[in-house]
Image (cartoon, rainbow, N blue to C red):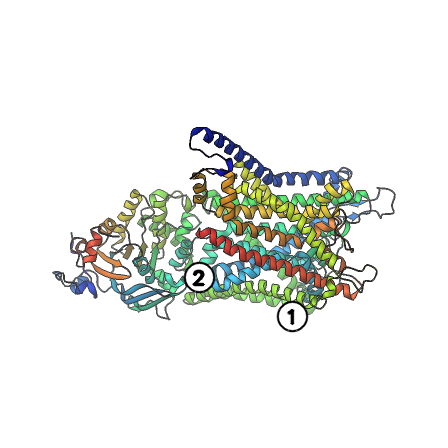
Amino acid sequence: MAVPTTTGGSGINSQPMRGSSSRALRTDRIFRSGTLVAAGTAPVLIAAIGIALFVAAKRSILLNGLGFFLGEKWKPNPPTAMMHVGNIFGVLPFVYGTLLTSLIALALAVPIGVGGAIFLAEIAPRKLSTPLSFFVEMLAAVPSIVYGYWGLSYLCPILVGVEHWLTTNFGHIPFFATTIGTGTGQDFFAAGLVLTLMILPFITAVSRDVLQTVPVSQREAALGLGATRWEAIRTVVLRYASSGIIGAVMLGLGRALGETMAVTMVIGGSVTIGHLKNLASFSIFRSGYTMTSLLMDQYPSPNSSLHAAALTQVALTLFLITVVVNAIARGLVWLTAMKAGGGSDNSVRLKLLVSSSLKNGFLACIVVVFLFQAASDIKHHGAAGLFGGAEVVFMLAIALWVISRILTNSRWQPQWRRFASAMGIAACAFCTLIAVGALIGLLTYVVQHGLPALNAGFFHKPDPDNPDSGGMLHAVVGTAELVFMAALIGIPTGILGGIYLSEFGNDRVGFVIRFFTDLLNGVPSIVLGIFAYAIIVVTTTAYQGVAGGVALAIMMIPTVMRTTEELMRLVPDSLREGSLGLGATNARTVWKVVLPSARGGVLTGALLAVARVSGETAPLIMVGCSSNLFHLDPRHALASLPVTIYVLRNAPSNLAIQQSWSAALVLVALVLIASLLARLISSRGIGATRTG
Amino acid sequence: MEQRTISLQPGEAVLSSKAAPAVTPVQATQVKAGPPRIAVKDLNCYYGKTQAIQSVSLDILPNQVTALIGPSGCGKSTFLRTLNRMNDRVAGWRVEGSVMLDGSDVYARSIDVVQLRRKVGMVFQRPNPFPMSIRENILYGPRLHGERNKARLDDIVERTLTQSALWDEVKNSLNKSAFDLSGGQQQRLCIARVLAVEPEVILMDEPCSALDPNSTFRIEQLLAELENRFAIVIVTHNLQQAARVSARTAFFLKGELVECCDTADLFSNPRDKRTEDYVQGRFG
């Protein structure tokens, strides 16, 4: 019998029915507004972050004016100075560093990532592509502190040699110019490389998903017209997916801009900017700062309150930049998704003009740069200069281009096209190999260095008096406590918000909330840390533990919200209609029918969010949540694994260094196990919903 | 009406008890159209362990439309896609027997699939224009195959769009996105796109199933015009359509070719009981 049990109505006669239905209506209204409140946290938080940062940075904004954004120098007075006079705050070097490292990362990660995505989505047989895709997703889950630590101790020493080779052979190209070398391999280039590895899995995974949405009929149409496999991918599949891929790249850029730990550990730390008068000053082999690494270095211990305000203004600048980039990314995806190809005659001509001039301009730049290099090589070495590294690379490229041109117009055209197709496919396979190889390299290194000290001693309490004994129990327990606090706030809010988006979010309100949720997802974690510091630690002068938990919770909300939404949308409407048709309220339908069907997926989202925040470092350092003592009181600073790694990276004690690697290993293991669990649950959970 | 051709048809259909046709098949074929463009012999196809096609032998003759009919899952689309090896992409796909195009084996190792598909063009069930302008859609094939001359490319655009009866509707908006066209126009664009690579055979996989009656009518008209220049194979669910557009009809059932003959004969005078039941709407 179809009786809405929540309302207690029991009869078929009209009296109780009316009563129960009005009560049902009220329940539904409460349910709807309750979930709306949860979903509304995203726009509210975005606004709150902006306001809080603005207020905290107000002094610097008033004092420095526009000079802040145009200044090339950053010289805060030493802490002993009594006066504000003499402080110089200019953000330009850090904007420069952030853009330079992000561009290096994009230049490398986009071709490799898209190539890998093509291999996974289009070429590899299912048996190969499933585990490989999973591998790539794991790479995305590794905490940035681990990348940074690995970069610092493994990559940078190798880079010293690589950079030497590059500067000798390509030194006359401004970006590869020799400048006062740090000799440590810690520079923009190193930061760019580590960033590449960090956004690579992200770009690969998102692009793969996009490619998989390209209809089979598009591929078949191209093949049917006599395209080779590679031609079909290059000219049709990629074109069809281009808007989505551009979106993926922009999101990757958003990540690169806000990445903190990995960059801070390998960028060397100095106020550096390029000058047009001296092109060599644009060298990527100089040490520098990004906005995030500056904050990481200076925010925890500012010289003066004005210095702190100026740093907050840097954070505000970073916040605004990432918000704009992410907003553009979303906008681009929507815009290009609406209209594919073509346009009015003029717009097509314009598009052709722009794309051809971009392409030709790019080629011309390369040619000029190489001629420049060749000219100076000849000047220095005579004819022998013609056979330097740069010249050989350049001549090979020209030869390849000429050969391809000749063959395309000859009777060998079919053979050449088959060869080119095979080469394209091989290149894509190679891209996948790079990503997978990097993961294996990283994991092996962490295991090698982390295993020796991973013994019972590791799980002892720390011994602040004697650095050569004691363990890391404080960090393990602290991480657990912080993540628990974050989950307590973040997961329920995220799930409720996700329910709102999937069940009621098809109107304009839902659209706005979804947009802000995505923006929140793109806000750098370090900014969230500064926000939590400003609203909790500054006002209470304590509660660093709680502030850390809150910062992590804010990070979890958008992830949990969007996965919950997506997975609840997969639940077929017939299930909802079935329940509603039996007289259940909306609220009951969601709780008892929709949510349980999407249970696996929702759990996955929560797990992934936990995995993501448990490796977070930057926000914890920003709120001052760092400790070398064992305690459980969240009113004070708590220790955590990632922060401990950061603090101990230059520790004098052998044991401390070994244990910091063990901490990295534990962290990686935790994160990977969580991802693995999430994967297992979701493959079962979603499968069940789809067949159900 | 002119004398339609009748196939040479080994297998059950010939062995069935119906009276032999007045003209012997071999003679008729040669009189009308010369040797078959595609000759399929004892074709067996498998998706993994499932056999999708069972020893089918069928000839596709030049300059006429051959219709493949049969209930869903009877293998007619699969058969169509073996002719230009479009099923090569499917994992677990396997072919036995021979498919000869102009005397050379389509499944031979030495065959370049790309060149094969140039000769055997394909139009799909749903219109699938590329996300490009109308013009770029047409020129996709010719550009792939190395045509760079602007005058010749312009000529191809006008010629194929005229052939596919679309020119008058789009000649002023060649740079518009192909997605802006109606479904019927998109399908005619897809046909024009195939014509642009100058195929010998055109395969059509239910080209009208996603179109409204009016667009369907336009496509059928178009088929009648193209018939004189190409060998066309069309898969259709719609028996009336097969009757309207084709010279010969092949009836598939459960992966077997039941009967293939002159379209008029197949509908009015089927030799096999199953064909009779199907064309009279008793099943399928």
- Above or below, comparing residue A342 to residue A471 in the picture: above
Q: Quadrant for residue B97, please give it.
A: bottom left
Q: Residue at x 31, y 47 (%)?
A: B165
Left or right of A174: which side holds A588?
A: left
Left or right of B30: which side holds A353?
A: right
- Above or below, comparing residue A24 to residue A409 in the picture: above
**Mark 1 residue type:** Ala
Q: Quadrant for residue A439, please give it.
A: bottom right
What is the quadrant of the N terminus of chain A in the image? top left
How many badges with numbers are in the image? Answer: 2
| Residue A383 circle label | 1
Q: Residue at x 42, y 33 (%)?
A: A12
Residue A560 visible in the picture: yes
Q: For numbered disc 1, what is the local secondary structure?
A: helix
> What whole-number distance in Å separates the C-alpha atoms at marks 2 and 1?
44 Å
* Circle 2 chain: A
Q: Residue at x 60, y 40 (%)?
A: A38
User: In the rendering, at what x and y percent does residue A421 appear?
Assistant: 46, 64
User: In the rendering, at what x and y percent does residue A54 appear?
Assistant: 71, 39
Question: Upstream in the sequence, badge 2 or badge 1?
Answer: 2
Farthest residue in the top direction?
A: A15
User: In the rendering, at what x and y percent does residue B190 appear?
Assistant: 36, 51
Q: For numbered disc 2, what is the local secondary structure?
A: helix
